[in-house]
Amino acid sequence: MSVNRRIFLASGAALSMPAADRVRAGIIGAGGRGRYLTAQFKEVGAEVAAVCDIYQPNLEAGLKAASTGAQSHTSYRKLLEDKSLDVVIVATPDHWHAQMTIDAVEAGKDVYVEKPLAHTVEEGFRIIEAVRRTRRIVQVGTQRRSSELFQEAKGIIDSGAVGEVRLVNSWWLNHQRSLSSNTFKGDLDWKQWLGSAPDRPMDPMRFFNWYYFWDYSGGLMVGQAAHIIDCINWFMGSKAPLAVTTSAGQNNLAGGEVPDTTCLTVEYPENYLAVFTLGYKAMRYNGFNDQMQQYHGMKARFDMGRESYALYPENTAVEMKPSAEKKLPGSFDSATRAHIRNLLECVKSRREPNAPVEAGQAANIVLCMAMESLRKGRRLRFNAASRRVEG
């Protein structure tokens, strides 16, 4: 990278820049989410100049989605050798997030890493250490932190209008009929895809449904709770839980391991409980109605949806009416663009992004404990001093 370009990137220049001065990004993991992020990065002015995937059909689709002339890679380490790349997007299965993020910052790249931050508590702390030592910018993909609606809602919580909160109820409800029955349609580097996970024979069920196998993720319990728990942590100012307990119904998605219906209870040192329920064998909902966080304060209840909020002051009326309310159906896609825009601004200014790794780890601790609690069938405690899960 030239001296002039380094100076430009360190400045607070606007994102409406000449093509030659655009932030150059590389995407690792060109599946559905990776291609969505590719389009969003391009939309806000970045050049997606490199694509890496170990499955040929994904790689080909990713190259079509990327900027003209994007370089093709089947090894993410080769992509990281490209000195012209400023940002790396990690959109792989969860069990690869930590190593790829660490390797990227060690290679001098800034990073956008999809949620959850990591697949274990220990990996999350390794990421923090590497990011702080290398002084790179890393944005975790919890885009609510960059949403104008959620920032406005955070201001209402901070104003004291809700009062002291001792209970947060939250849920995410929708319907998934079955797991994917896709078959392989091109070359796949199975060994590289497995990475640190246990060695197993090549299996399309695991590859196309990795979300639902403990070796790679924690299902939609983790995928959706990553957003909700992060938002609760943000609104309530929490950095780590005291304890987590998880329960589940039977697994109703044939072929997978992780249940579709779960409930996790989080005890926090700030003296409140947060309960998150996932129900993906419920009826189908419009995205506007599929999730909710209810902050039960001593002055009011605050309801936070995907694209709405409402403040209900203490009231003895049969029908409660909000004193403040906003509904913005169809607005949530803009949150991802705002989140990416925030990252690109921080790449130039070197300021902290809206979702730094410490915030990602605060949620990751809860998520990893939730998985372990469910599998062990008991309440687990987090020892903040030793940074270990106990119980």
Image (cartoon, grey):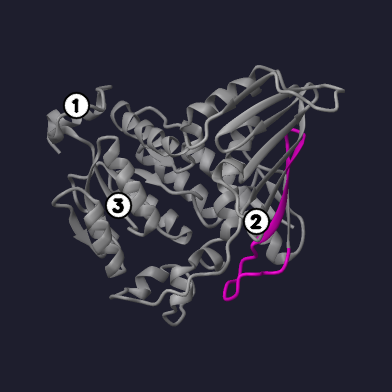
Q: Residues within 10 Å of mark 1 (few under 14, many from 20)?
A: few
| Residue 115 vertical position relative to residue 54 in the rendered view, above or below | above
Q: Amino acid at mark 3?
A: Ile
Whichever of callouts 2 and 3 sits on the residue coming sooner in the sequence is 3
| Observer able to see residue 364 | no
Under mark 2, the amino acid is: Met
Q: Is residue 55 magenta?
A: no
**Quadrant where the N terminus lies?**
top left
Secondary structure beneath disc 2? loop
**Residue at mark 3:** 27
Three-letter code, disc 1: Ile
* Residue at image coords 19%, 27%: 8
Residue 183 locus on image (x, y percent): 39, 77
Position of 9 with respect to 350 (left or right) is left
Please, is residue 386 above or below residue 298 in the view? below
Which residue lies at the image location 65% right of the left edge and 61% below the top edge? 281
Given residues 111 and 133, the one toward you in this image is 111
Q: State the extent of the magenta-drawn residues as a range.
A: 249-274
Query: At 32% across and 55% down in the image, what residue appears?
Result: 28
> Pointer 3: residues within 10 angstroms few (<14), some, or many (20+)?
many
The residue at which mark 1 appears reads as 7
- Compared with 256, 285 (above or below) is above
> Which element type, helix, strand or loop, lies under badge 3?
strand
- State the CA–CA distance, disc 2 to disc 1: 53 Å
Q: Earlier in the sequence, mark 1 or mark 3?
A: 1
Task: State the residue in front, 28 or 368.
Answer: 28
**Mark 2 or 1, which is nearer the eye?**
2
Tell me if 133 is positioned left or right of 81 in this view.
right
Residue labelled with disc 2:
283
